[in-house]
Image: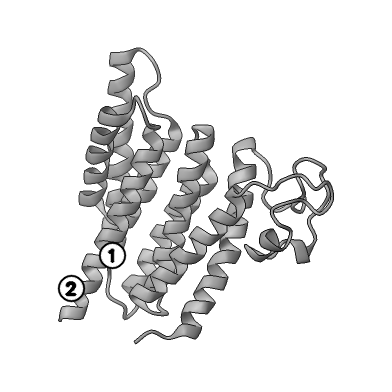
Amino acid sequence: MIVWPELLFAFVIGACVGSFLNVCITRWPHDLSVISPRSRCPRCERPITAIDNIPILSWLVLRGKCRGCGLPISTLYPAIELLTALGWTAAVLAFGPTFTAVRVAVLGTILLGIAVTDARHYLIPDGFTVFGLMFALLTSVVAFFGTETQVFATPYDALVGACAGAGLIAIVGWLGEVVTKREAMGLGDVTLMAFVGAALGPTRALMTVFVGATLGSRFGGRVHVGLLRLLFVGVLLFTAFEMARRAVAAT
């Protein structure tokens, strides 16, 4: 049964999280703090007031322009907020107002942030991957002692998966460097796969590396490999969650 207040609440929370995600996407690639200073127009540097910082709505009311200088505000900002809001709503729709839904929503948010940053700057900030790794490990312990069905890796599998994912991608990177005589994988790829392994467990983490490498070798000349890899990880995550949800519903 669909409970609209719960979905609306998830949408609002997701939009607010998406607003903060925009800050992370904008600042972390330049090694800037996401805490201070407060958000401001990147052109005229006018601080953004609270009324002008309401996710999605403020951009629509201002017609996509800065209140101070009148120059256009990138559509990426409301798009990120909307996508994050829809992701949180979908998580609650699939799993209800549960701890599992929060885990799905947070991990999906992190993957979105990584994908956008990787596509724009060709790098993966540690802020995303390290937080994701810690979140996946900690929540695996909390969920293990809870009453909800495990759709993520158990604490043991999360730890093994983190090591397996990071270790394998490090080996692949080393072999690629030996063959091509240039850096094939960055540290961001290693911490990314540690995060993914902690969420999915060793088996699905290794599958992610294999399919990601296959996609990269097939389409890497036309589409950024990092974006393809993250898109696959996202699909794999939500496919696994949906399969688990349906299995639980059938019992």
Q: Looking at the image, which residue is at 45% across and 44% down?
A: 115
Image location (x, y in percent) of residue 209: 27, 40
The dot on residue 137 is none
Left or right: residue 76 versus residue 221 is: right
Quadrant where the image shows the N terminus: bottom left
Residue 124 in view here: no
Identify the element where label 2 is drawn: helix
The dot on residue 247 is 2
Which residue occupies the foreground of this view, 118 or 8?
8
Q: Looking at the image, which residue is at 34% across and 56% down?
A: 199
The vertical placement of 55 against 176, above or below, is: below
Residue 242 in view here: yes
Which image quarter: residue 58?
Answer: bottom right
Amino acid at dot 1: Phe
How far apart marks 1 and 2 lie (CA) works out to 10 Å
Image location (x, y in percent) of residue 240: 25, 60
Query: Are the residues flagged by discs 1 and 2 in contact, CB closer than 8 Å?
Result: no
Residue lying furthest left in this view? 251
Image location (x, y in percent) of residue 23: 64, 51
Q: Looking at the image, which residue is at 46% across and 47% down?
A: 129
Amino acid at dot 2: Ala
Identify the element where label 1 is drawn: helix
Quadrant where the image shows the C terminus: bottom left
Crowd class of label 1 (few under 14; some 14 to 19; many from 20; radius 10 Å): many
Left or right: residue 129 versus residue 244 is: right
Badge 1 or badge 2: first in the primary sequence: 1
Residue lying furthest front in this view? 63
Image location (x, y in percent) of residue 49: 80, 61
Crowd class of label 2 (few under 14; some 14 to 19; many from 20; radius 10 Å): few
Which image quarter: residue 52?
Answer: bottom right
Q: Which residue is mark 1?
A: 241
